[in-house]
Image: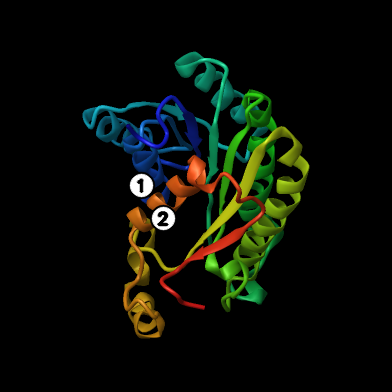
Amino acid sequence: MGKLNGKIAIVTGASKGIGASIAEELGREGASVVVNYASSKDGADKVVKRITDAGGKAVAVGANVSKPEEIAKLVEGTKAAFGGRVDVLVNNAGVYQFAPLEQTTPELFHRIFDTNVLGLLLTTQAVVPLFPETGGSIINIGSLVGRNASANAAVYSATKGAVDSITVALSKELGPKKIRVNSLNPGPVVTEGAAGFTEFFETLTPQTPLGRVGQPSDIGRAATFFASDDSAWITGEVVVAAGGLR
C-alpha cells in the first residue's frame, strides 16, 4: 500500500521539472493527481501517462494560477475528475527572471510576483474549502534563494522569501482546520528550465556537503513526506533540500 492511497492531490506547474517529479511521486504512493499546467498541455499529458502507466490515477488540468478566473477552472477540473475533495495541495507553479537593479521594471515585478506569490495565495484560497474536516497538507515550493538571495535576482528572491512568510502565517491560520502548511526550499536542481545554468551549478557542487546538485526526484520524495501522515506533527516549517548547501 502507498502512503497516499485514497488521497487526492493538486500539483500546480506540474508539466515538467520539479512539479512533474512531485506529481509522479505522489501518484506512485497512491494519490489521484491533478497535474496542472499553464501552457504545456503536451508536457502535462506526458506526466499523466507516466503516472497511469505505473498504475496510478491522474488528469491534466490547464490553468494559469496568476489569473483568478483560471484558478476557478482548476477547481472545477478537479471536481469533475475526482469529486469535491482535496487532501494535498502543492503550490509549485512559478516563474523566474534574473535582472540587475537597473533593468528591474514594474512589468517584471508583477509578472513574477503575480505567479509566485499572488497565485499561491489565490490558489490556496480556492482549494482550502475542498479539504475535508480531517484536514490535509499544503506544500509550498520556495527556494534556497528565499533566505540566501542571489545577485541580479532581487525580485525572484523576494518572492521566495514571501512564500516562506506566507507558509508560517497560513500554518497558524489553517491549523484549526487540521491543514498543515509547510515550505520546501530546493537548492540547485537539474531541470529542463535550468539547462542554461550548467556552469553555475558546477561552481556550486564543491560547496555542497553532499557533493552534487539536486535531481527533481530528490524534491519529489521530500514533498511526499510532507503530503503523508509521516509528517502529521509538522506544520509551519521551512525545510531546505539542497544537499547541505547554505
Give the amino acid type for the residue marked by disc 2 in the picture.
Answer: Ile
Q: Vertically, is 150 above or below 74? A: below
The span from disc 2 to disc 1 (Cα, nearest Å) is: 8 Å
**Scheme of colours in the image:** rainbow
Q: For mark 2, what is the residue?
A: 219
Q: Vertically, is 4 above or below 114? A: above
Q: For mark 1, what is the residue?
A: 21
Give the amino acid type for the residue marked by disc 1 in the picture.
Answer: Ser
Q: Vertically, is 56 above or below 246? A: above
Residue 224 location (% of width, % of height): 43, 45
Residue 102 location (% of width, % of height): 66, 75
Q: Which residue is drawn at 23% across and 32% down?
A: 54
Residue 130 location (% of width, % of height): 63, 24
194 left or right of 68 in image = left
Q: Which residue is drawn at 35% across and 85% down?
A: 206
Q: Could you tell me if the residues under marks 2 and 1 are in contact, i.e. CB atoms within 8 Å? A: yes
Ranked by sequence position, the earlier of labels 2 and 1 is 1
6 left or right of 183 in image = left
